[in-house]
Amino acid sequence: MTLLKHAAFTAAMATMLFVPSFAQAQERPWGSGWRSPGWDSPMRAPAADSRHRDPREGRVDVSRFVVAGAAERLGQGPVTVQSESGDGPWVEESRRAAYEAAIVDALIGAGYETRHSGDANAQLVTLKIARRVLAPAEEKKNPVSGSAAMSVGTRGSAYGLAVNVDLSKPRPALISTRLDARITDKASGKVLWEGYASIATREGDEDWNDARIAGKLADTLFDDFPRAGSVVPADAPMG
């Protein structure tokens, strides 16, 4: 009998402890919590700026043309290099030295002689270097942003706040630098070959100064010289 009374007492106590807890769980005002409908979306923090790299950055585009029958005359003998400027986005004279030097190195690598460029039979390489803005610099922005949401119901009210902190700096302008080169016969003035190469870089990027940009463009332009993507008839005008 004593054992039966003890068992009955234990069961009664368990029932008393269980019922209030269950009732309390049923009265929770938040339902299933932050995942309940209407709350998951407002409380999600704004997506941080992914700041994806522009696919144009560092990419070199190149086009080359050779006059029919001129390939055997290219890549040998003396050559003279000069650069030009004019109206429009042309790079000023003070910044053209790096490009001229890079082209000279590329021409030597292609087989030309640059030490006796005054020869009457020399070929002339004329350069033009231009820069233009592909994408303007980003405006300065507020590093702290966020969103808030509020819900009012029969079981109470709730307020939520999400804050996003973005300490990244605005990106500088994306600049296209284009190097044009034309090779002509110095005596007759006839065009033998021409091409251009361009690259997009961020303004002020320490990894892409004038010397590196010039070297990249010159190397690409004269890669496998005098190979060209297009052969132009000898009597065709090349503007």
Image (cartoon, grey):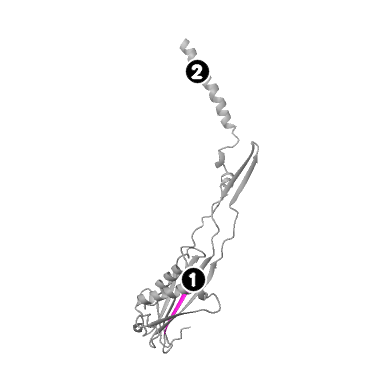
Residue nearest the observer in this picture, 180 or 48? 180
Pinpoint residue 97: horizontal percent, then vertical percent: 46, 74
In the image, which is nearer the foreground, mark 1 or mark 2?
Answer: 1
Q: Secondary structure at mark 2?
A: helix
Q: Which residues are magenta?
A: 176-184
Q: Secondary structure at mark 1?
A: strand
Disc nearer the start of the sequence (1/2): 2
Q: Main secondary structure of the magenta part?
A: strand
Please tell me whether residue 178 belongs to the stretch shown in magenta.
yes
Q: Which residue is most to the top?
A: 1
Residue nearest the observer in this picture, 191 or 79? 79
Residue nearest the observer in this picture, 103 or 55? 103
Q: Residues within 10 Å of mark 2 (few under 14, many from 20)?
A: few
Residue 26: which quarter of the image? top right
Which residue is drawn at the image coordinates 59% and 50% (left, top)?
A: 144
- Is mark 1 in CB contact (under 8 Å) with mark 2? no
Which residue is drawn at the image coordinates 46% and 77% (left, top)?
A: 180
Residue nearest the observer in this picture, 68 or 9? 68
Asked if 7 appears above or below 150 in the picture, the reply is: above
Left-right relation of 171 to 108: right
**Residue kind at label 1, given as amino acid type:** Thr
Question: What residue is pinned by disc 1?
Answer: 177
Question: What residue is pinned by disc 2?
Answer: 10
